Amino acid sequence: MKKKFKITGMHCTSCAMTIDMDLEDLEGVKSSNTSYAKQETEVEFDSQKVSDNLVIETIKKSGYSAILK
């Protein structure tokens, strides 16, 4: 399953890389593609192992805010 999330609080491309690394550490996340320019991330994950809320909480723990697009 692929879903997009709107992210606020990113200041640079390093912020996007941090989000990608933290999301890809979750078991069940296949890929994360975060765009600083678009202020969003597209996450491909196994919905049996990862929920929308877990993605959002992980982004929050990284220091940013997120909502499902």
Image (cartoon, rainbow, N blue to C red):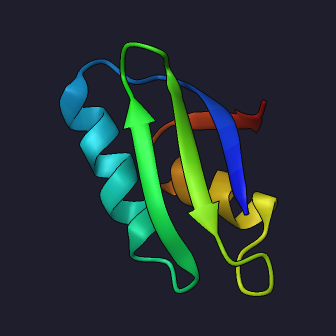
Q: Position of residue 69 (x, y in %)?
A: 78, 30
Q: Is residue 33 above or below residue 6?
A: below
Q: Residue furthest top?
A: 37
| Horizontal arrangement in the rendering, residue 67 relative to residue 6 (left or right) | right
Q: Is residue 48 above or below residue 66?
A: below
Residue 25 lies in what quarter of the image? bottom left
Residue 32 lies in what quarter of the image? bottom left
Nearer-the-camera pick, 8 or 48: 48
| Horizontal arrangement in the rendering, residue 42 relative to residue 5 (left or right) | left
- At 19% from the left and 35% from the top, the residue drawn is 14
Q: Is residue 2 above or below residue 35?
A: below
Q: Quadrant of the N terminus?
A: bottom right
Q: Residue furthest left?
A: 14
- At 69% from the left and 78% from the top, the residue drawn is 46
Q: Position of residue 35 (x, y in %)?
A: 40, 28
Q: Position of residue 6 (x, y in %)?
A: 65, 27
Nearer-the-camera pick, 47 or 11: 47
- At 29% from the left and 49% from the top, the residue drawn is 18
- At 38% from the left and 13% from the top, the residue drawn is 37
How many marks can you see?
A: 0
Q: Position of residue 40 (x, y in %)?
A: 54, 28
